[in-house]
Structures are given as C-alpha cells and as structure tokens.
Amino acid sequence: MSLVIHQLDVNKRAERKRFIKSQWAFYKNDPKWVPPLIAEKLGDMDPSKNPFYKHSEIQLFLAERNGKTAGRIAAIVNYNHNKTHNDKLGFFGYFECEDNQETADKLFDEAAKWLRTKGMDTMRGPENPSMNDEIGLLIDGYELPPLILMTYNPKYYLKLIENNGFEKSKDIYAYWLQEGYESEKLLRLKDLISKRFDIKYREVNTKNKDQFKKYINSIKEVYNSAWEPNWGFVKWTDEEMDHLAVGLKQIADTKTAIIMDINGELAGFGIGLPDINQCLIHNKSGSLLGALWHIVTKKKKINAARIIALGIIPKYQNYGLDAVLYYELGHRCINQGYINGEASWVLEDNEKMNRAATQTMNGKLYKKYRLFDKKI
C-alpha cells in the first residue's frame, strides 16, 4: 500500500483546512470526541492572525495511504521557549495517526527532518502549539470526554510514540472535583487567612472595554510572575494575551473569572470556564453555525467547569492564599450550576498543587497526560 507524506503550506487557507478536517478520519465514530471548530482552528494556525507565530514557526505534514488520510503532524519551533530555557528544542503537535507504526515513523521523521533544518536537536510533544495551549497525550482516563481545551486521543497513540523512540518528559494531571469539595483543612485555612488579610474580589467585566483590558493586564501580570519558575514556562507576549482574551471572552462566565486584591493591591486570579464541550460534542460537523445552535440550546444544561488557571504573585505566595482562592472559585462555580469541575493541568512533580488538589479540595486524580522527548 502506497504511503505519501505531503508538506502543506500553512499560509494557504485551503491547505490549513485540509489539515484540520483530516482529524475527522480518526474520530468520526468515537462518541467521546469533541469536534473542533473549523473556523477557530483556521485562525489559530494562520501565521498572519495568531501572534504566536510572530516569534515561532510551524510546518504541517499530512500522510495519505492510497489517497485516504492516514495521519498528520505539525513541527513547531517556539523561539521564545528556546530563548527562555537556552536550549534547541523543537516541538510536534496536532498528531493523529492510523494504527500503523510505519505511518507514525514517517510522520515523526518528516517533523524531525524539518526541525533539524531550523537548528533543533530535540523534539518534544505533543503541544498544540505551545505550553500555553492544549498539551499532552492522554495516557490514562479514557472513560469521559475531555473538558474544554483539554486533549483526547486513542489509546494506541502511546504505543506509536514510544515505539518511535520517544521517552517520557513529564506527566500532567487532571483532578475531578465535586460539590462538597471543601475539606476540613480548606475551611480552616479559609477562616484563618480571611481574618488575616483584607481580601476583595473583582469579577471580569466583558462589556466595558477599558475595564476588560485592565482585567486582562492583571491576569498577565500574575501569570507571568507566578508561573515563571514552572517547568517549560514561557511568558505570554502582550499580543498573545490579547488574542487569547478575545477567544475566552466569548465563553467565560463573569462570575467565575475573578481577580484577588489584598489591601487594594493585585494578589492573584482564578478562572473557571464553563465546560462548553458538553455542547460542542454534539456539533459533529465542526461548523460555527452548528456550534452556536448547540450552545444556545444546551448551555443551561452545562454542569461542570474547568479551573483553567489560578495563580498568586510571588509576594503573596506561601501564605495559604491559594486555599482562599480555591474556596471562592469553587463556590462561585457551584452557584452558577457547575456542580462538578476539573482542576488541570498540574505537573506531576508540583507537590504543592497535587497536595492541594487531593487533600485540600478532595479532588480525585482521574486523567493523566504525558509529554515526550526524543533526540533528533
């Protein structure tokens, strides 16, 4: 059987669309798969529209066997990552493949070959396309569909990747939270810390342009300082943050996206996004019109949220303020009808966050994702 690898031109809309729609070949009969919005992905992969590509590059590859889709992969160079970490790391992302090792090997070979031309010596992934986006291969917890902005894949992908010579780089955890998440420890910490600090919360205002921009700037300030010590972290540029904000603005619940102030000073933030995947899972075509229809008709039935980001600036870390933020965000989510939730993604060796998820919030580790490295 003839296998052909096509190198697509990411600057051409038709080529990007061909790459995006190839995903349907692998999931069209999988009831847990949440189809992406084609229009959204077209914009995300467009170097002229996504500010990520002002400092990075991407190359798309599509595999066909006898004229039918057999796999795909993207090779990515994130120059800001390499400046931050002083390495020569290239990435692979958007990986999909038939259960055939030859196909997987040829896709990885093409990605590695392109990355070497850019001076890279190691390949890591999957990242779609960076650590600030959808990352990791699902390796445990296939029973439930993914929540918003989380990845999903067949079980056999693990075999294809490991057989190609990739080794584990880092595991990432997702915890399931339910109503009644408040442990005695959380309640005790919340009471003690609330008495010690003058804590106020600001909700996001999406209708006032100036206030929304101020809110986004506050998040960026906390994120870029709180996450700086984290493995693989790369600061958002102003344009990247603004670009992300435009997308999240469409789906955010203003009650569950909050800024924490202490004595009138910025201290932290937390964002719980409604799991609109519960609506989009029914949008089998990936069309924008279909997505709008399912969101309008099913939004009130959403019963889960994903805690997508939470941080405390260094000055206020180690005071237990994260516990107060967990409590506040959890109660706000429940009050909005999101009685279940996911806290993710949490690095496997982040002892503080893993301990907080299990002991402070009674969370259950229910999904694991993995990033892989390979010398090229």
Image (cartoon, rainbow, N blue to C red):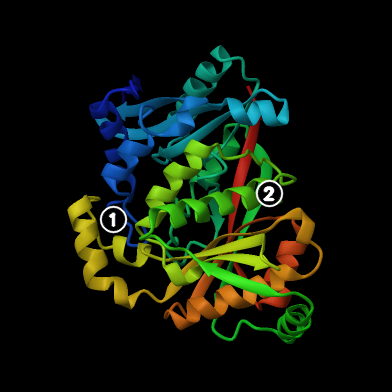
Q: Secondary structure at mark 2?
A: loop
Type of amino acid at the residue the image marks with label 1: Asn
- Pointers 2 and 1 in contact (CB under 8 A)? no
Residue ID at (49%, 70%): 256
Q: For residue 336, what is the image quadrant?
A: bottom left
Question: Measured from the top left, where is residue 257 in percent x and y?
Answer: 50, 65
Quarter of the rendering containing residue 198: bottom right
Q: Secondary structure at mark 1?
A: loop
Horizontally, residue 85 falls left or right of residue 111, namely right
* Amino acid at circle 2: Trp
9 lies above or below 19: above
> Left or right: where does residue 135 sit relative to residue 6?
right
The x and y percentages for residue 273 are 46, 64
Nearest-to-viewer mark from 2 and 1:
2
Crowding at mark 1 (Cα within 10 Å: few <14, some 14-19, many 20+): few
Task: Locate residue 364, reporting x and y percent.
Answer: 62, 73
Residue at 62% x, 19% y is: 120
The residue sitting at 57% across, 42% down in the picture is 131
Place of residue 315 in the rendered image (x, y in percent of width and height, measured from the top left)? 78, 56
Residue 114 as seen in the image, left or right of residue 263: left
CA distance separating discs 2 and 1: 39 Å
**Residue 59 position (above or below residue 28):** above
Question: Which of the two labelled residues, at mark 2 and mark 1, occupies the earlier sequence position?
Answer: 1
**Badge 2, how many Cα within 10 Å: few under 14, some, many 20+?**
some
Q: Residue at x 41, y 54 (%)?
A: 248
Query: Would residue 129 be seen by someone viewing this image from the given angle?
Result: no
Q: Quadrant of the C terminus?
A: top right
Task: Read off the residue under disc 2.
Answer: 227
Residue ID for mark 1: 29
Q: Nearer the viewer, residue 242 or 344?
A: 242
Q: Quadrant of the N terminus?
A: top left
